[in-house]
Image (spheres, grey):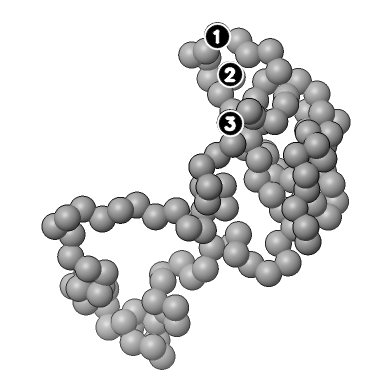
Amino acid sequence: MAKLSRADLQRIVERQMPKYKLAETPAAPGAADGAKTRAKPEAQTPDLDTLRKKYLREKFLSAEGGYQDREPNGQPAADADGDDTEIVLVEPKVAPHPLDRGSRPKAVVISSKQKKIVGEQG
């Protein structure tokens, strides 16, 4: 399913959360879907295969008893085919004090098929 335009997202947020608007600063690329964001290893960190051999049992290292893609959690749910949801950041229209927790952006999940908010943070 195609992603919704920014104007469509704003209309959905206005309709269901009238005191909020889309955040002006978008999240870092890949941060919302969690697919491509990885921390950089330290210089002295051993490679992943060495750590697997040291800390995982044999059943996790073998192809028949362990992970087929060599990842313990498999592919992230955001990479699933037919995923019609989009995570966007919203912030209050009238921001209270900058250090107030209510002034920070919060994430909402919008379904492009249903054209409504299906989940929200907090």
Discs 1, 3 touching: Cβ within 8 Å: no
- The reply to whether the C-beta atoms of the residues labelled 2 and 3 are less than 8 Å apart is no
| Amino acid identity at mark 2 | Ser
Residue 25's disc number: 3
Badge 1 amino acid: His
* 40 horizontally vs 34: left or right: left
Q: Quadrant of residue 63?
A: bottom left
Q: Is residue 122 visible?
A: no
Residue 41 sits above or below residue 26 on the image: below
Is tag 2's residue or tag 3's residue first in the polypeptide sequence?
3
Foreground mark, 1 or 3, reads 3
- The local crowd at label 2, few if under 14, some if 14 to 19, many if 20 or more residues have their Cα within 10 Å, is some
Of 69 and 5, the residue lying toward us? 5
Where does residue 48 sit, x and y in percent of width and height?
26, 69
Residue 43, percent across and down? 17, 55
**Height in image: 69 above or below 28?**
below
Q: Name the N-terminal-most of marks 1 and 3.
A: 3
Contact between labelled residues 1 and 2, with CB atoms less than 8 Å apart: yes
| 67 to the left or right of 3 | left
Q: Which mark is residue 115?
A: none
Which of the labelled discs sits on residue 97, or is there none?
A: 1
Secondary element type, mark 3 = loop
Q: Tell me the kind of residue under disc 3.
A: Thr
The residue beneath circle 2 is 103
Mark 3 nearby-residue class (10 Å; few <14, some 14–19, many ≥20): few
Q: Label 1: state its secondary structure.
A: loop
Quarter of the rendering occupied by the N terminus: bottom right
Calculate the distance from the C-alpha at mark 1 to the C-alpha at mark 3: 18 Å
Q: Mark 2 or mark 3, which is nearer to you? A: 3
For the residue labelled by badge 2, is the local secondary structure a helix, a strand or a loop?
helix
